[in-house]
Image (spheres, helix red, strand yellow):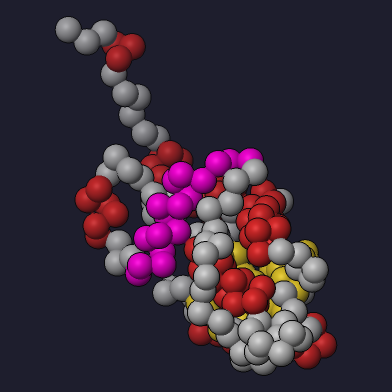
Amino acid sequence: MRSDSDAKPALNDDDALFLEEMAGVKPISSDRQLLKTKQLDPVSAEARRQAAVAQPVTASSLTTSEVEWLDPWVPLSYKRPGVQNGVFRKLKQGAYAAEARLDLHRMTVEQASEAVFRFVRDAQKYDLRSLVIVHGRGGRDGSGKAVIKSYVNRWLPELEAVQAFASAQERDGGTGAVYVLLKKSERKKQENSIRINKGRLL
């Protein structure tokens, strides 16, 4: 026989709205049906899997095995489904002021993967959304391989927080750098939900 203390409290309007806003933000291993209804592309599915097993403080689950090498001068461009075309266009134009910048020059692949992982994680922690990552063009050894750039192009889609990225304008590094747009942090989502709910009650 269950006691009253075992019963789950009923959700009030604030809780219900918050849960609605937060739906789909993180993978919910106990709700497989929810995940099946989300049309996840392979990269997103892998990012969710890696996020679930990544250590919270120091470990990065980003790919460090060999990837497809890019030409040093090829522009990067990526956006997740749901990102508005106008927002993506402004990102490519450099219309969003960079709130933080990371320089990967002279780093090994392992060092760069850890730096990118921490950079994006910390940016979300401090509610930053517009970033610049300077990866360089590479190819100076005559191989034609833009090593760190190629990895950055692979890593960013693996991070669930990254909504879009595109090679920078020349003033910000051109094809040797990339603009990155992050989704709103969970704290900001909660604050917005509370603010919207309060507005409805006024």
- Where does residue 116 sit, x and y in percent of width and height? 66, 61
Residue plotted at (61% across, 90% down): 71
Residue 128 % position (x, y): 70, 59
Which sits in the foreground, 27 or 195? 27
Q: Is residue 170 above or below residue 4?
A: below
* Residue for point 75% across, 74% down: 134
- Region of the chain picked out in magenta, as a range: 41-57
Q: Is residue 172 magenta?
A: no
Looking at the image, is 103 positioned above or below residue 78?
above
Measuring 72% from the left and 71% from the top, which residue is drawn there?
133
Instruction: Give 161 or 5, whichever is nearer the viewer.
Output: 161
Going by the image, does 42 lie left or right of 179?
Answer: left
Q: Is residue 43 magenta?
A: yes
- Quadrant placement of the N terminus: top left
How many numbered marks appear?
0
Does residue 186 lie above or below 166 as drawn? above
Residue 129, given in percent of the width and then of the height, sits at: 66, 64
Q: Main secondary structure of the magenta part?
A: helix
On screen, residue 62 above or below 168: above
Residue placed at 53% from the left, 53% from the top?
61
Q: Position of residue 194 (x, y in %)?
A: 54, 46
